[in-house]
Image (tube, rainbow, N blue to C red):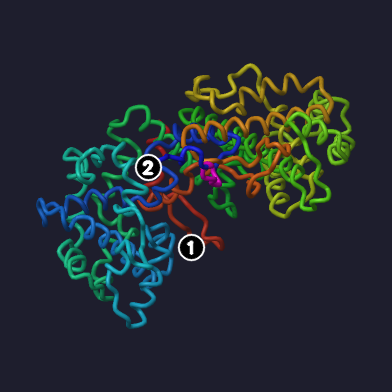
Protein backbone atom coordinates (compact mmCIF):
# COMPACT_ATOMS: atom_id res chain seq x y z
CA UNK A 1 0.00 0.00 0.00
CA UNK A 2 1.36 3.41 -0.98
CA UNK A 3 1.60 5.86 1.88
CA UNK A 4 1.71 9.62 1.19
CA UNK A 5 3.98 11.37 3.69
CA UNK A 6 4.71 14.69 1.98
CA UNK A 7 2.12 16.45 4.12
CA UNK A 8 4.23 15.95 7.22
CA UNK A 9 7.39 17.30 5.62
CA UNK A 10 8.57 20.65 6.98
CA UNK A 11 7.81 23.64 4.72
CA UNK A 12 10.59 24.94 2.51
CA UNK A 13 12.31 27.92 4.10
CA UNK A 14 13.02 30.94 1.91
CA UNK A 15 14.45 34.36 2.68
CA UNK A 16 11.25 36.17 1.78
CA UNK A 17 10.60 39.89 1.57
CA UNK A 18 8.71 42.44 3.64
CA UNK A 19 8.81 40.51 6.91
CA UNK A 20 6.59 43.06 8.67
CA UNK A 21 4.26 43.88 5.79
CA UNK A 22 5.32 47.52 6.21
CA UNK A 23 6.48 47.79 2.61
CA UNK A 24 3.15 46.69 1.15
CA UNK A 25 1.39 50.06 1.63
CA UNK A 26 4.38 51.75 -0.04
CA UNK A 27 4.03 49.40 -3.02
CA UNK A 28 0.30 50.14 -3.21
CA UNK A 29 1.06 53.87 -3.22
CA UNK A 30 3.72 53.96 -5.92
CA UNK A 31 1.71 51.47 -7.96
CA UNK A 32 -1.03 54.11 -8.11
CA UNK A 33 1.38 56.97 -8.77
CA UNK A 34 3.40 55.35 -11.59
CA UNK A 35 1.18 52.74 -13.27
CA UNK A 36 2.52 51.33 -16.50
CA UNK A 37 6.12 51.54 -15.27
CA UNK A 38 7.46 48.92 -12.87
CA UNK A 39 10.71 48.21 -11.05
CA UNK A 40 11.74 45.84 -13.85
CA UNK A 41 10.60 47.75 -16.97
CA UNK A 42 13.87 49.61 -17.26
CA UNK A 43 14.04 50.78 -20.88
CA UNK A 44 11.49 52.52 -23.06
CA UNK A 45 12.36 50.71 -26.27
CA UNK A 46 11.31 47.32 -24.94
CA UNK A 47 7.74 48.68 -24.99
CA UNK A 48 8.01 48.82 -28.80
CA UNK A 49 10.67 46.17 -29.50
CA UNK A 50 8.68 43.26 -28.08
CA UNK A 51 5.46 43.99 -30.04
CA UNK A 52 7.62 44.46 -33.16
CA UNK A 53 9.53 41.25 -32.56
CA UNK A 54 6.42 39.07 -32.45
CA UNK A 55 4.67 41.02 -35.24
CA UNK A 56 7.77 40.70 -37.42
CA UNK A 57 8.08 36.97 -36.68
CA UNK A 58 4.46 36.46 -37.73
CA UNK A 59 5.19 38.21 -41.04
CA UNK A 60 8.19 35.98 -41.79
CA UNK A 61 7.18 32.66 -40.28
CA UNK A 62 3.37 32.51 -40.33
CA UNK A 63 1.99 29.70 -38.20
CA UNK A 64 5.48 28.29 -37.59
CA UNK A 65 5.36 27.86 -33.83
CA UNK A 66 8.25 25.39 -33.77
CA UNK A 67 10.80 28.16 -34.30
CA UNK A 68 9.13 30.78 -32.16
CA UNK A 69 10.73 30.37 -28.74
CA UNK A 70 14.26 29.81 -30.03
CA UNK A 71 14.10 32.70 -32.50
CA UNK A 72 12.53 34.94 -29.89
CA UNK A 73 15.35 34.19 -27.44
CA UNK A 74 18.01 34.78 -30.08
CA UNK A 75 16.42 38.12 -30.97
CA UNK A 76 16.25 39.09 -27.30
CA UNK A 77 20.01 38.48 -26.98
CA UNK A 78 20.79 40.22 -30.25
CA UNK A 79 18.98 43.37 -29.10
CA UNK A 80 21.18 43.55 -26.01
CA UNK A 81 24.37 42.86 -27.97
CA UNK A 82 23.57 45.64 -30.44
CA UNK A 83 23.11 48.19 -27.66
CA UNK A 84 26.27 47.16 -25.81
CA UNK A 85 28.35 47.19 -29.00
CA UNK A 86 27.03 50.64 -29.90
CA UNK A 87 28.24 51.97 -26.54
CA UNK A 88 31.71 50.59 -27.13
CA UNK A 89 32.14 52.07 -30.60
CA UNK A 90 30.67 55.48 -29.70
CA UNK A 91 30.71 57.28 -26.37
CA UNK A 92 30.99 54.35 -23.86
CA UNK A 93 27.95 55.80 -22.08
CA UNK A 94 26.08 52.75 -20.79
CA UNK A 95 23.28 54.92 -19.43
CA UNK A 96 22.31 55.68 -23.04
CA UNK A 97 22.98 52.27 -24.57
CA UNK A 98 23.30 49.00 -22.69
CA UNK A 99 22.16 49.78 -19.15
CA UNK A 100 19.46 47.41 -17.86
CA UNK A 101 19.21 45.52 -21.14
CA UNK A 102 17.95 41.96 -20.74
CA UNK A 103 20.69 39.40 -20.07
CA UNK A 104 23.40 42.06 -20.25
CA UNK A 105 25.61 40.63 -17.51
CA UNK A 106 25.88 37.27 -19.26
CA UNK A 107 26.17 38.74 -22.75
CA UNK A 108 28.99 41.16 -21.92
CA UNK A 109 31.36 38.21 -21.87
CA UNK A 110 30.00 37.02 -25.21
CA UNK A 111 30.75 40.40 -26.77
CA UNK A 112 34.22 40.46 -25.22
CA UNK A 113 35.01 37.13 -26.88
CA UNK A 114 33.59 38.29 -30.21
CA UNK A 115 35.69 41.44 -30.16
CA UNK A 116 38.73 39.30 -29.33
CA UNK A 117 38.17 37.30 -32.54
CA UNK A 118 36.16 34.33 -31.28
CA UNK A 119 32.93 33.12 -32.88
CA UNK A 120 29.59 33.97 -31.29
CA UNK A 121 26.61 31.70 -31.66
CA UNK A 122 23.40 33.04 -30.17
CA UNK A 123 22.19 29.53 -29.38
CA UNK A 124 25.04 29.12 -26.90
CA UNK A 125 23.28 31.74 -24.79
CA UNK A 126 19.67 30.85 -25.54
CA UNK A 127 19.77 27.11 -24.89
CA UNK A 128 18.19 26.17 -21.57
CA UNK A 129 20.91 23.52 -21.13
CA UNK A 130 23.81 25.91 -21.69
CA UNK A 131 26.03 27.01 -18.81
CA UNK A 132 26.00 30.45 -20.47
CA UNK A 133 22.19 30.69 -20.67
CA UNK A 134 21.12 34.35 -20.72
CA UNK A 135 17.70 33.80 -19.13
CA UNK A 136 15.73 30.93 -17.62
CA UNK A 137 12.24 32.17 -18.53
CA UNK A 138 11.37 30.72 -21.98
CA UNK A 139 10.18 34.13 -23.13
CA UNK A 140 13.22 35.95 -21.77
CA UNK A 141 12.78 39.54 -20.66
CA UNK A 142 9.27 39.72 -22.06
CA UNK A 143 8.02 36.80 -20.00
CA UNK A 144 9.88 37.83 -16.86
CA UNK A 145 9.56 41.61 -16.87
CA UNK A 146 7.42 43.26 -19.52
CA UNK A 147 4.48 41.00 -20.41
CA UNK A 148 2.05 42.15 -17.73
CA UNK A 149 2.81 45.82 -18.22
CA UNK A 150 2.52 45.67 -22.01
CA UNK A 151 -0.78 43.83 -21.63
CA UNK A 152 -2.06 46.49 -19.22
CA UNK A 153 -1.12 49.16 -21.74
CA UNK A 154 -2.99 47.24 -24.48
CA UNK A 155 0.14 46.73 -26.58
CA UNK A 156 0.15 42.96 -26.15
CA UNK A 157 -2.41 40.25 -25.47
CA UNK A 158 -1.19 37.95 -22.72
CA UNK A 159 -4.24 35.68 -23.10
CA UNK A 160 -3.27 34.65 -26.63
CA UNK A 161 -2.19 31.03 -27.05
CA UNK A 162 0.25 29.41 -27.17
CA UNK A 163 2.40 32.52 -26.72
CA UNK A 164 1.76 36.17 -26.00
CA UNK A 165 0.75 38.23 -29.07
CA UNK A 166 0.71 41.91 -30.06
CA UNK A 167 -2.66 43.67 -30.18
CA UNK A 168 -3.95 44.72 -33.57
CA UNK A 169 -5.24 48.06 -32.25
CA UNK A 170 -2.08 49.33 -30.56
CA UNK A 171 0.74 46.81 -30.82
CA UNK A 172 0.69 46.33 -34.60
CA UNK A 173 0.81 50.06 -35.51
CA UNK A 174 3.71 50.54 -33.09
CA UNK A 175 5.50 47.54 -34.61
CA UNK A 176 5.11 49.02 -38.08
CA UNK A 177 6.75 52.23 -36.88
CA UNK A 178 9.75 50.25 -35.62
CA UNK A 179 9.97 48.36 -38.90
CA UNK A 180 10.01 51.58 -40.93
CA UNK A 181 13.27 52.82 -39.40
CA UNK A 182 15.35 49.68 -38.70
CA UNK A 183 16.82 47.02 -41.05
CA UNK A 184 14.58 44.10 -40.17
CA UNK A 185 15.82 41.78 -42.93
CA UNK A 186 19.39 41.81 -41.69
CA UNK A 187 18.25 41.46 -38.09
CA UNK A 188 16.37 38.27 -38.93
CA UNK A 189 19.20 36.93 -41.10
CA UNK A 190 21.46 37.06 -38.04
CA UNK A 191 18.78 35.37 -35.92
CA UNK A 192 18.30 32.62 -38.51
CA UNK A 193 22.00 32.00 -39.09
CA UNK A 194 22.75 31.90 -35.35
CA UNK A 195 26.13 33.52 -36.09
CA UNK A 196 26.90 37.08 -34.97
CA UNK A 197 29.61 39.20 -36.55
CA UNK A 198 30.83 42.60 -35.42
CA UNK A 199 29.81 44.17 -38.72
CA UNK A 200 26.28 42.80 -38.15
CA UNK A 201 26.06 44.53 -34.78
CA UNK A 202 27.39 47.77 -36.25
CA UNK A 203 25.00 47.62 -39.20
CA UNK A 204 22.07 47.05 -36.84
CA UNK A 205 22.81 50.01 -34.54
CA UNK A 206 19.42 51.51 -35.45
CA UNK A 207 18.02 49.01 -32.94
CA UNK A 208 20.13 50.37 -30.08
CA UNK A 209 18.10 51.58 -27.12
CA UNK A 210 19.66 55.03 -27.56
CA UNK A 211 18.26 55.41 -31.10
CA UNK A 212 14.64 55.51 -30.00
CA UNK A 213 14.49 59.31 -30.12
CA UNK A 214 15.62 59.19 -33.78
CA UNK A 215 12.79 56.84 -34.71
CA UNK A 216 10.30 59.68 -34.73
CA UNK A 217 7.00 57.87 -35.14
CA UNK A 218 7.93 55.14 -32.67
CA UNK A 219 9.19 57.64 -30.10
CA UNK A 220 6.13 59.84 -30.54
CA UNK A 221 3.80 56.88 -29.97
CA UNK A 222 5.64 55.83 -26.80
CA UNK A 223 5.73 59.42 -25.52
CA UNK A 224 2.00 59.72 -26.11
CA UNK A 225 1.57 56.45 -24.21
CA UNK A 226 3.67 57.40 -21.17
CA UNK A 227 2.04 60.83 -20.88
CA UNK A 228 -1.36 59.51 -22.02
CA UNK A 229 -1.78 62.37 -24.46
CA UNK A 230 -4.80 60.63 -25.99
CA UNK A 231 -6.50 59.96 -22.64
CA UNK A 232 -6.56 56.24 -23.40
CA UNK A 233 -5.79 55.04 -19.88
CA UNK A 234 -8.19 57.14 -17.82
CA UNK A 235 -7.15 57.75 -14.20
CA UNK A 236 -4.02 55.61 -14.45
CA UNK A 237 -2.80 57.53 -17.46
CA UNK A 238 -3.49 60.85 -15.78
CA UNK A 239 -1.58 59.85 -12.66
CA UNK A 240 1.39 58.53 -14.64
CA UNK A 241 1.50 61.80 -16.59
CA UNK A 242 1.47 63.84 -13.40
CA UNK A 243 4.22 61.81 -11.71
CA UNK A 244 6.42 62.04 -14.80
CA UNK A 245 5.63 65.75 -14.98
CA UNK A 246 6.64 66.13 -11.33
CA UNK A 247 9.99 64.42 -12.01
CA UNK A 248 10.59 66.76 -14.95
CA UNK A 249 9.62 69.77 -12.84
CA UNK A 250 12.00 68.75 -10.07
CA UNK A 251 14.83 68.29 -12.57
CA UNK A 252 14.11 71.70 -14.06
CA UNK A 253 14.08 73.28 -10.58
CA UNK A 254 17.31 71.78 -9.18
CA UNK A 255 20.20 74.21 -8.91
CA UNK A 256 23.67 73.46 -10.22
CA UNK A 257 25.51 70.78 -8.29
CA UNK A 258 22.41 68.76 -7.37
CA UNK A 259 21.78 65.97 -9.84
CA UNK A 260 18.53 64.07 -10.18
CA UNK A 261 18.87 61.02 -7.90
CA UNK A 262 16.38 58.90 -6.00
CA UNK A 263 17.63 60.25 -2.66
CA UNK A 264 17.04 63.82 -3.83
CA UNK A 265 13.60 62.92 -5.20
CA UNK A 266 12.65 61.30 -1.89
CA UNK A 267 13.79 64.24 0.21
CA UNK A 268 12.30 66.92 -2.03
CA UNK A 269 8.91 65.24 -2.38
CA UNK A 270 8.75 64.43 1.34
CA UNK A 271 9.51 68.01 2.36
CA UNK A 272 8.17 69.89 -0.64
CA UNK A 273 11.46 71.78 -0.67
CA UNK A 274 14.56 71.87 -2.87
CA UNK A 275 18.12 71.47 -1.54
CA UNK A 276 19.44 74.33 0.62
CA UNK A 277 15.80 74.99 1.67
CA UNK A 278 15.06 76.70 -1.63
CA UNK A 279 11.41 77.11 -2.57
CA UNK A 280 10.05 74.54 -5.00
CA UNK A 281 7.40 76.21 -7.16
CA UNK A 282 5.21 73.20 -7.94
CA UNK A 283 2.30 73.88 -10.31
CA UNK A 284 -1.11 73.71 -8.70
CA UNK A 285 -2.11 70.73 -10.85
CA UNK A 286 0.81 68.66 -9.50
CA UNK A 287 0.44 69.49 -5.81
CA UNK A 288 -1.89 66.58 -5.08
CA UNK A 289 0.60 64.20 -6.72
CA UNK A 290 3.42 65.75 -4.70
CA UNK A 291 1.40 65.20 -1.51
CA UNK A 292 0.92 61.53 -2.40
CA UNK A 293 4.66 61.05 -2.95
CA UNK A 294 5.24 62.69 0.44
CA UNK A 295 2.94 60.12 2.05
CA UNK A 296 4.81 57.35 0.25
CA UNK A 297 8.11 58.52 1.77
CA UNK A 298 6.52 58.89 5.20
CA UNK A 299 5.33 55.28 5.03
CA UNK A 300 8.78 54.18 3.86
CA UNK A 301 10.45 55.93 6.82
CA UNK A 302 8.02 54.18 9.17
CA UNK A 303 8.83 50.90 7.45
CA UNK A 304 12.62 51.05 7.80
CA UNK A 305 12.38 52.24 11.42
CA UNK A 306 10.21 49.24 12.33
CA UNK A 307 12.41 46.89 10.30
CA UNK A 308 15.37 48.16 12.34
CA UNK A 309 13.50 47.46 15.57
CA UNK A 310 12.70 43.94 14.34
CA UNK A 311 16.30 43.26 13.35
CA UNK A 312 17.69 44.69 16.59
CA UNK A 313 15.32 42.56 18.63
CA UNK A 314 16.29 39.44 16.71
CA UNK A 315 19.98 40.19 17.26
CA UNK A 316 19.39 40.50 20.98
CA UNK A 317 17.31 37.32 21.00
CA UNK A 318 20.10 35.37 19.29
CA UNK A 319 23.44 36.73 20.60
CA UNK A 320 26.68 35.69 18.89
CA UNK A 321 28.00 34.28 22.15
CA UNK A 322 25.94 31.20 23.06
CA UNK A 323 26.81 31.68 26.73
CA UNK A 324 24.86 34.97 26.72
CA UNK A 325 21.67 33.40 25.37
CA UNK A 326 18.58 33.53 27.59
CA UNK A 327 15.50 31.44 26.87
CA UNK A 328 12.21 33.33 26.53
CA UNK A 329 8.90 31.53 26.43
CA UNK A 330 6.95 34.29 24.71
CA UNK A 331 7.28 37.50 22.75
CA UNK A 332 5.90 39.40 25.74
CA UNK A 333 8.51 38.08 28.18
CA UNK A 334 11.33 38.89 25.76
CA UNK A 335 9.99 42.40 25.06
CA UNK A 336 9.72 43.09 28.79
CA UNK A 337 13.28 41.92 29.44
CA UNK A 338 14.62 43.81 26.43
CA UNK A 339 12.93 47.07 27.46
CA UNK A 340 14.42 46.77 30.95
CA UNK A 341 17.91 46.07 29.60
CA UNK A 342 20.93 48.38 29.56
CA UNK A 343 20.55 49.48 25.93
CA UNK A 344 17.03 50.84 26.39
CA UNK A 345 17.95 52.36 29.75
CA UNK A 346 20.82 54.23 28.10
CA UNK A 347 18.55 55.49 25.31
CA UNK A 348 15.94 56.66 27.84
CA UNK A 349 18.66 58.60 29.63
CA UNK A 350 19.91 60.19 26.39
CA UNK A 351 16.41 61.19 25.30
CA UNK A 352 15.79 62.58 28.79
CA UNK A 353 12.00 62.41 28.58
CA UNK A 354 9.61 61.22 31.25
CA UNK A 355 7.21 59.97 28.61
CA UNK A 356 6.97 59.65 24.85
CA UNK A 357 4.56 62.56 24.88
CA UNK A 358 7.07 64.80 26.64
CA UNK A 359 9.67 63.79 24.04
CA UNK A 360 7.31 64.92 21.28
CA UNK A 361 6.58 68.17 23.13
CA UNK A 362 10.26 68.93 23.47
CA UNK A 363 10.82 68.26 19.77
CA UNK A 364 8.45 71.11 18.97
CA UNK A 365 11.24 73.51 19.82
CA UNK A 366 14.33 71.48 18.94
CA UNK A 367 13.62 69.36 15.86
CA UNK A 368 14.44 70.82 12.44
CA UNK A 369 11.52 71.98 10.32
CA UNK A 370 10.38 69.61 7.61
CA UNK A 371 11.93 71.77 4.87
CA UNK A 372 15.37 71.55 6.50
CA UNK A 373 15.95 68.03 5.22
CA UNK A 374 19.72 68.38 4.88
CA UNK A 375 19.98 68.95 8.65
CA UNK A 376 21.63 65.97 10.39
CA UNK A 377 18.74 65.80 12.86
CA UNK A 378 16.02 65.63 10.20
CA UNK A 379 14.31 62.24 9.86
CA UNK A 380 15.58 61.86 6.29
CA UNK A 381 19.16 62.07 7.55
CA UNK A 382 18.54 60.11 10.75
CA UNK A 383 16.99 57.26 8.75
CA UNK A 384 19.97 57.20 6.39
CA UNK A 385 22.34 57.12 9.36
CA UNK A 386 20.29 54.33 10.94
CA UNK A 387 20.68 52.09 7.89
CA UNK A 388 24.42 52.75 7.71
CA UNK A 389 24.74 51.89 11.40
CA UNK A 390 22.89 48.64 10.80
CA UNK A 391 25.24 47.75 7.94
CA UNK A 392 28.25 48.43 10.17
CA UNK A 393 26.84 46.21 12.89
CA UNK A 394 26.52 49.00 15.45
CA UNK A 395 25.22 48.20 18.92
CA UNK A 396 21.60 47.95 20.02
CA UNK A 397 21.70 51.25 21.88
CA UNK A 398 22.61 53.20 18.73
CA UNK A 399 19.97 51.46 16.61
CA UNK A 400 17.24 51.89 19.23
CA UNK A 401 18.00 55.59 19.64
CA UNK A 402 17.93 56.22 15.89
CA UNK A 403 14.77 54.20 15.25
CA UNK A 404 12.91 55.87 18.14
CA UNK A 405 14.05 59.27 16.89
CA UNK A 406 12.69 58.57 13.40
CA UNK A 407 9.38 57.39 14.85
CA UNK A 408 9.14 60.41 17.16
CA UNK A 409 9.82 62.82 14.29
CA UNK A 410 7.18 61.09 12.17
CA UNK A 411 4.71 61.32 15.06
CA UNK A 412 5.49 65.00 15.54
CA UNK A 413 4.84 65.75 11.83
CA UNK A 414 1.49 63.93 11.80
CA UNK A 415 -1.40 66.21 10.93
CA UNK A 416 -4.28 64.69 12.87
CA UNK A 417 -6.81 66.72 10.90
CA UNK A 418 -5.94 64.79 7.75
CA UNK A 419 -6.41 61.15 6.81
CA UNK A 420 -3.11 59.25 7.25
CA UNK A 421 -3.14 58.35 3.56
CA UNK A 422 -4.53 61.62 2.27
CA UNK A 423 -5.84 61.44 -1.28
CA UNK A 424 -4.48 57.94 -1.94
CA UNK A 425 -7.06 55.23 -2.60
CA UNK A 426 -6.25 53.17 0.49
CA UNK A 427 -9.45 51.59 1.87
CA UNK A 428 -9.16 50.00 5.33
CA UNK A 429 -9.57 46.50 3.90
CA UNK A 430 -6.39 47.04 1.83
CA UNK A 431 -4.45 47.27 5.09
CA UNK A 432 -6.02 44.27 6.83
CA UNK A 433 -3.01 42.04 6.25
CA UNK A 434 -0.49 44.79 7.04
CA UNK A 435 -0.90 45.73 10.71
CA UNK A 436 1.90 48.30 10.80
CA UNK A 437 0.85 51.24 8.65
CA UNK A 438 0.36 54.99 8.96
CA UNK A 439 -3.15 54.64 10.37
CA UNK A 440 -2.21 52.09 13.03
CA UNK A 441 0.95 54.07 13.81
CA UNK A 442 -1.20 57.12 14.58
CA UNK A 443 -3.28 55.03 17.00
CA UNK A 444 -0.15 53.60 18.59
CA UNK A 445 1.34 57.06 19.13
CA UNK A 446 -1.83 58.17 20.92
CA UNK A 447 -1.32 55.26 23.32
CA UNK A 448 2.43 55.85 23.65
CA UNK A 449 2.12 59.49 24.69
CA UNK A 450 1.52 58.66 28.34
CA UNK A 451 4.06 55.82 28.42
CA UNK A 452 7.71 55.89 29.46
CA UNK A 453 10.41 55.25 26.85
CA UNK A 454 11.07 51.68 28.15
CA UNK A 455 7.33 50.95 28.08
CA UNK A 456 7.09 52.29 24.53
CA UNK A 457 10.04 50.14 23.54
CA UNK A 458 8.43 47.04 25.05
CA UNK A 459 5.21 47.68 23.13
CA UNK A 460 7.12 48.45 19.93
CA UNK A 461 9.12 45.22 20.12
CA UNK A 462 5.94 43.20 20.78
CA UNK A 463 4.20 44.97 17.89
CA UNK A 464 7.03 44.17 15.47
CA UNK A 465 7.66 40.58 16.55
CA UNK A 466 3.98 39.64 16.69
CA UNK A 467 3.41 41.28 13.32
CA UNK A 468 6.29 39.30 11.86
CA UNK A 469 4.73 36.06 13.13
CA UNK A 470 1.36 37.05 11.68
CA UNK A 471 2.81 37.98 8.29
CA UNK A 472 4.94 34.81 8.12
CA UNK A 473 1.95 32.64 9.06
CA UNK A 474 -0.14 34.22 6.32
CA UNK A 475 2.62 33.60 3.75
CA UNK A 476 2.97 30.01 4.95
CA UNK A 477 -0.76 29.48 4.54
CA UNK A 478 -0.81 31.03 1.07
CA UNK A 479 2.40 29.61 -0.39
CA UNK A 480 3.41 26.66 1.79
CA UNK A 481 6.81 28.31 2.27
CA UNK A 482 8.32 29.46 5.53
CA UNK A 483 9.59 33.04 5.85
CA UNK A 484 9.91 32.96 9.64
CA UNK A 485 12.95 34.64 11.16
CA UNK A 486 11.66 33.91 14.65
CA UNK A 487 9.35 31.21 15.92
CA UNK A 488 8.16 29.77 19.23
CA UNK A 489 9.48 26.29 20.03
CA UNK A 490 9.69 23.92 22.96
CA UNK A 491 13.04 25.59 23.69
CA UNK A 492 11.45 29.04 23.73
CA UNK A 493 11.70 31.73 21.05
CA UNK A 494 14.23 30.85 18.36
CA UNK A 495 15.77 33.00 15.63
CA UNK A 496 15.64 31.30 12.22
CA UNK A 497 18.06 31.94 9.38
CA UNK A 498 19.77 35.21 8.58
CA UNK A 499 18.41 38.33 10.28
CA UNK A 500 16.91 40.52 7.53
CA UNK A 501 18.45 44.00 7.14
CA UNK A 502 16.20 47.08 6.97
CA UNK A 503 15.61 48.17 3.38
CA UNK A 504 13.79 50.91 1.51
CA UNK A 505 11.20 50.12 -1.10
CA UNK A 506 12.14 51.05 -4.66
CA UNK A 507 9.52 53.45 -6.02
CA UNK A 508 10.05 52.94 -9.80
CA UNK A 509 11.93 56.24 -9.85
CA UNK A 510 15.09 55.01 -11.62
CA UNK A 511 12.99 53.28 -14.27
CA UNK A 512 10.88 56.40 -14.83
CA UNK A 513 14.00 58.57 -15.18
CA UNK A 514 15.62 56.11 -17.62
CA UNK A 515 12.45 56.07 -19.73
CA UNK A 516 12.43 59.89 -19.76
CA UNK A 517 16.05 59.78 -20.92
CA UNK A 518 15.22 57.22 -23.61
CA UNK A 519 12.43 59.32 -25.14
CA UNK A 520 14.68 62.41 -25.08
CA UNK A 521 12.91 64.33 -22.32
CA UNK A 522 15.96 64.26 -20.03
CA UNK A 523 19.58 64.65 -21.05
CA UNK A 524 23.00 65.18 -19.54
CA UNK A 525 24.68 68.61 -19.60
CA UNK A 526 28.32 67.93 -20.60
CA UNK A 527 29.29 71.50 -19.63
CA UNK A 528 28.67 70.76 -15.95
CA UNK A 529 31.38 68.99 -13.90
CA UNK A 530 28.87 66.37 -12.73
CA UNK A 531 27.15 66.14 -16.15
CA UNK A 532 23.99 67.21 -14.38
CA UNK A 533 20.68 65.93 -15.69
CA UNK A 534 18.66 68.63 -17.43
CA UNK A 535 15.28 68.87 -19.14
CA UNK A 536 15.45 69.01 -22.93
CA UNK A 537 13.24 71.15 -25.12
CA UNK A 538 10.94 68.16 -25.61
CA UNK A 539 10.97 67.61 -21.86
CA UNK A 540 9.97 71.21 -21.17
CA UNK A 541 6.99 70.82 -23.49
CA UNK A 542 5.96 67.58 -21.77
CA UNK A 543 6.42 69.17 -18.34
CA UNK A 544 4.16 72.05 -19.33
CA UNK A 545 1.53 69.69 -20.75
CA UNK A 546 1.56 67.62 -17.56
CA UNK A 547 1.11 70.75 -15.47
CA UNK A 548 -2.15 71.80 -17.12
Instruction: Please tell me whether residue 11 belongs to the stretch shown in magenta.
Output: yes
Q: Which residues are magenta?
A: 10-16
- Identify the residue at image location x=50%, y=36%: 27
Give the residue pinned by disc 2: 541
- Identify the residue at image location x=50%, y=46%: 251
Which mark identifies residue 526? Answer: 1
Main secondary-structure element of the magenta-colored stretch: loop
548 to the left or right of 353? left
On the rendered image, what quadrant is the N terminus found in?
Answer: top left
**Image quadrant where residue 76 sits:** bottom left
- Identify the residue at image location x=17%, y=45%: 172
Picture layout, residue 376 above or below residue 328: below
**Image quadrant where residue 455 sits:** top right
Picture layout, residue 521 above or below residue 416: below
Q: Is residue 437 visible?
A: yes
Callout 1: few (<14), some (14-19), or many (20+) C-alpha neighbours within 10 Å?
few
Amino acid sequence: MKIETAWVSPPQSIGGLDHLGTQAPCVLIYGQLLPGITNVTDRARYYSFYPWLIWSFDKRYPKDETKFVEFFRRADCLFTLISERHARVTDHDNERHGAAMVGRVQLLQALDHLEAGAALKLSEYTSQESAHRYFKNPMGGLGQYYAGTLADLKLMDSSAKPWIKYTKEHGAPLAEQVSSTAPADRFWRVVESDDVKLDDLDALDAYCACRLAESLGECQTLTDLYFDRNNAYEQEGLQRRRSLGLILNLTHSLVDGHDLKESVFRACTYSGTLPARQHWAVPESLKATLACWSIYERNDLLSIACQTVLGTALRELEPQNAADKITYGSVESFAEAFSNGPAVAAVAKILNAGSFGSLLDRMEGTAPSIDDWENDEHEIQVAGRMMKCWSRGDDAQTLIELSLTVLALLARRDDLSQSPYGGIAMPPEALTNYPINLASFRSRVAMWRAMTIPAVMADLVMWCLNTHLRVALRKLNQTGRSTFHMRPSERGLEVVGEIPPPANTTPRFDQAVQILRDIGALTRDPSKPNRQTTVSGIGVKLMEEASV
